[in-house]
Amino acid sequence: PYPEDDADAGRLMKMRLAANDPVALGAAAGRCLAEGKFSDAFKYAKQAAALGDLHAHLHLGYLYMEGKGVEADGKKGNYHLEESAIGGHPTARCNLGKGEGQWGNHERAMKHFIIAANQGSDVAVEQLREGFKEGHVSKDDFAAALRAYQRAVDAT
């Protein structure tokens, strides 16, 4: 049912949270992140991720990497980013690519960005453009990624 007002929306959300609805849990995590309530965001994201929500894994990756609402743990952060990326989340894939680039693993970073570009990520295309300028990605790979990006954008 569609909520009639804010009070009704709040009541319906509480029902969905109590029922462990992963979409509702993930939305609650995102709302808490936006409000700076990192401990609550962690709690909701952890529940949603356990139920398979890819966006929740992305949130957990961020929280662990930044040490917000939980003790910083790069391995756990990377694990959750990988789970989200493997599931097809382009933002998680870009975050993995940025991390690899910072660690000097440029070839691996470009592979992440190529995959994300294939999923229609503007950020990935910009990262690939920079990688091409710096010699980390070939002209052929860059061109193929641009064509795949355009196909993904045209399909949406």
Image: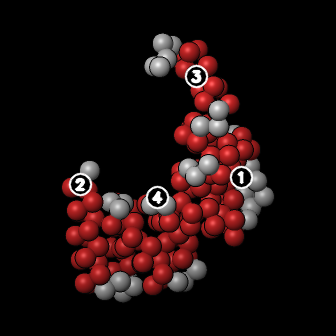
In this rendering, the answer to whether 14 lies above or below 27 is above
Gap between marks 3 and 4 measured at Cα: 27 Å
Q: Which amino acid, by three-letter code, is at mark 1? A: Lys
Which disc, if any, is residue 6?
Answer: none
Disc 4 designates what residue? Answer: 89
**Residue 22 falls in image quadrant:** top right
Q: Position of residue 85 (x, y in %)?
A: 50, 64
Q: Is residue 44 left or right of residue 99?
A: right
Kindly indicate whether the residue at mark 4 contacts the one at mark 3 (C-beta within 8 angstroms): no
Which disc, if any, is residue 68?
Answer: 1
Q: Residues within 10 Å of mark 3 (few under 14, many from 20)?
A: some
Q: Position of residue 63 (x, y in %)?
A: 67, 54
Res 33 seen here: no
Disc 2 designates what residue? Answer: 155
**Residue 119 falls in image quadrant:** bottom left
Gap between marks 2 and 3 measured at Cα: 34 Å
Gap between marks 3 and 1 measured at Cα: 28 Å
Marks 2 and 1, the one that precedes in the sequence: 1
**Residue 126 falls in image quadrant:** bottom left
Q: Residues within 10 Å of mark 4 (few under 14, many from 20)?
A: many
